[in-house]
Image (spheres, grey):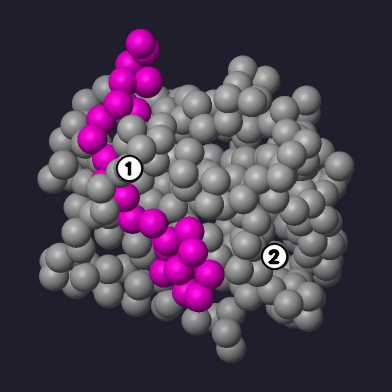
Amino acid sequence: MTDTEMILTRPWQLVDESVTGLDLDPVHSFAMDDTLCEAAAKYVNSGFVRTWVHDRTIVLGIQDSRLPSIEKGIAQLMDDGYHVIVRNSGGLAVVLDAGIYNISLVLSEERGLTIDRGYETMVALTRKLFPELGERIVDGEIPASYCPGRFDLSVNGRKFAGISQRRIRGGIAVQIYLAVSGSGSERAEVIRRFYDTAVRGGEVRYSYPSIRPEDMASLEELMQQPLTNQEVTDRIHNTLGNGRIPLFSWGAQEEERYRYHLERMKKRNERLSR
């Protein structure tokens, strides 16, 4: 067993918002992960797994929010029925909807748990969750996808997931979005159109992706069989908890820190709502 695989055998506590998250503002999730990062510092050699799903939201990167025609880009997304927020971590625009399943592995920032090792742990978990694809799952940038990065996950050149990482106050949140169901190319087209509109009329100071929608897919498209969010939740229980992961008991201290982080996320997004 590799060091990365050994991380997955640790005791986990679950925060499951794969259903309840559909009724929550997505800024909640970024506040939640920051809160759990702080709590994780007290749980050496264990960790939290949080599952979350939000409906019809575009999460922009900080750089995206500074595009020359960002107001027009956001208006277009809203006309298409999407809520728009800006994340508090790195990366570029991604789609959230009922077919996108997100997992956060939250661990204490201990010695040896490097940035690369954090990413590799999530890659290993994904391969275990979907043995039908197994080693066909490749990590490496898919340049013509939305939010391209070194730890994109793909099968036959079609991206179905992206991994990000956030480290604060002694904790690490390794986050993955999994396109479980629906059309990967249709989601990519939404982001492609957003960039076409938002980059017009001024200087763009970063390299935004030139998106080719056919380079993205969902797991059910790649597996050629139906796949539900509940099935993914069941697979997580079986993979990380031998059938059942115990729920994390939320306390007054976590509630206080959550309120703090939520207010910070709301302030970050005030400009978008004006």
Neighbour tally class for label 2: few under 14, some 14-19, many 20 plus, Cα within 10 Å: many
**Residue occupying the point 44% across, 52% down:** 51
Q: Which residue is mark 2?
A: 67
- Tell me residue 219's x, y (percent): 69, 40
Q: Which residues are magenta?
A: 1-30
Q: Tell me, yes or no, whether the highlighted magenta stretch contains residue 13.
A: yes
Query: In the image, what residue occupies the spot 39% across and 57% down?
Result: 16
The amino acid type, in three-letter code, at marker 1 is Arg
Instruction: Give the answer, above or below, for where 100 lies relative to 267.
Output: above
The N terminus lies in quadrant: top left
Query: Which residue occupies the foreground of this view, 156 or 239?
Result: 239
Q: On the picture, is 21 further left or further right than 219?
A: left
Distance (Cα) linking label 2 and label 1: 45 Å
Q: Secondary structure at mark 1?
A: loop
State the mark number for residue 68: none
- Which residue does the numbered mark 1 point to in the structure image? 244
